[in-house]
Image: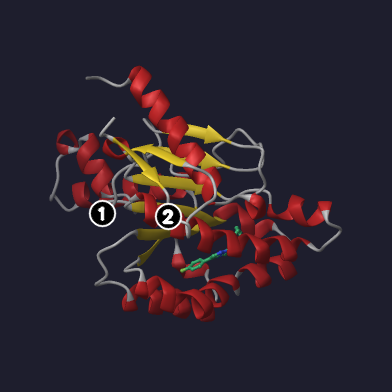
Amino acid sequence: MDRFFFNTDVNTDKKNMLLDQDNIPSHIAIIMDGNGRWAKQKGLPRVAGHREGMKTITNVVEKANDIGIQFLTLYAFSTENWKRPKTEVDFLMKLPERFLDKELPALQKNNVKVKTIGDPSLLPPHTKQAVDKAVRETENNSGLVLNFALNYGGRHELVEAVRKLGREVEHGHLKPEDITESLFSDRLLTSEIPDPDLLIRTSGEIRLSNFMLWQLAYSEFWFTEVLWPDFNGGHLVEAVQRYQQRKRRYGGV
Ligand code: V07
């Protein structure tokens, strides 16, 4: 029983938080789906859902920090999302600035380190600048790593890694037989981040949508019908509890 921790902090959540402190996932990845549907249900424009979804991030980061998660990767914008109407894309590209203008001081205070994965080359300069600034200003923080997948695509990442390795072979720095799983991982955008222990996808869709294809090979998956704007710290704890139940059932020792 000493391995369990009963959280009574009034500032965190009303729900009792019973988590095994020796089995907290290091890295949680989240596909934040259902913002458009949330808005539609309320008769609001899709962008209202995105705005509300941004508020959820603040809440979830706080709870992730509380329970001792070390890495949190959020799928903010996929390589496929460019196909959406231009007005929606333009709005989405303003969200990193909006989020950071409002939240960067709190992230600093909480020792959060902002990182990104994805191809920055297609981002509008204003978006890229805001993100670069947040990464730069938090690079010496040692707490939770908040990793935004922005213009990220799993297949694109894999193809880029293959190209890198191809060039290394071409220049004689590497022999094909030297390429191992570990070396391959080192050429991915997540080379400095461990693979996710847990993937969460909101809004009831049961698919990966080109997210972290290599990195999720051994992860636990947790899907919920809850739409991202309705997701909260209590749901995060529930996902971690389910993760811990599965680990107890199937894990070694
Ligand atoms: C976006 C809000 C959350 C719901 C999902 C889609 C819409 C935060 C960011 C962000 C990205 C990089 C960064 C800081 C914040 C973001 C996009 C969309 C494109 F350094 N939320 N959010 N970026 N949504």
Colouring mode (rainbow / by chain / secondary structure / one colour): secondary structure
Q: Is residue 213 visible?
A: no
Residue in the foreground of this view, choosing between 238 and 159: 238
Q: Is residue 223 visible?
A: yes
**Which residue, given by chain and number where applicable, does mark 1 sit on?**
192
Q: Position of residue 30 (x, y in %)?
A: 50, 47
Report the residue at 51% width, 41% height from top: 200
The answer to whether residue 247 is left or right of residue 240 is left
Residue in the foreground of this view, choosing between 122 and 167: 122
Report the residue at 51% width, 38% height from top: 238
The answer to whether residue 135 is left or right of residue 103 is left
Please state which amino acid type lies under the numbered disc 1: Glu
Q: Position of residue 75 (x, y in %)?
A: 51, 53
Asked where in the image residue 158 lies, by quadrant, the reply is top left
**Which residue, given by chain and number where applicable, does mark 2 sit on?**
9
The answer to whether residue 34 is left or right of residue 74 is right
Question: Closer to the observer: label 1 or label 2?
Answer: 2
Please state which amino acid type lies under the numbered disc 2: Asp
Real-space Cα distance between discs 1 and 2? 33 Å
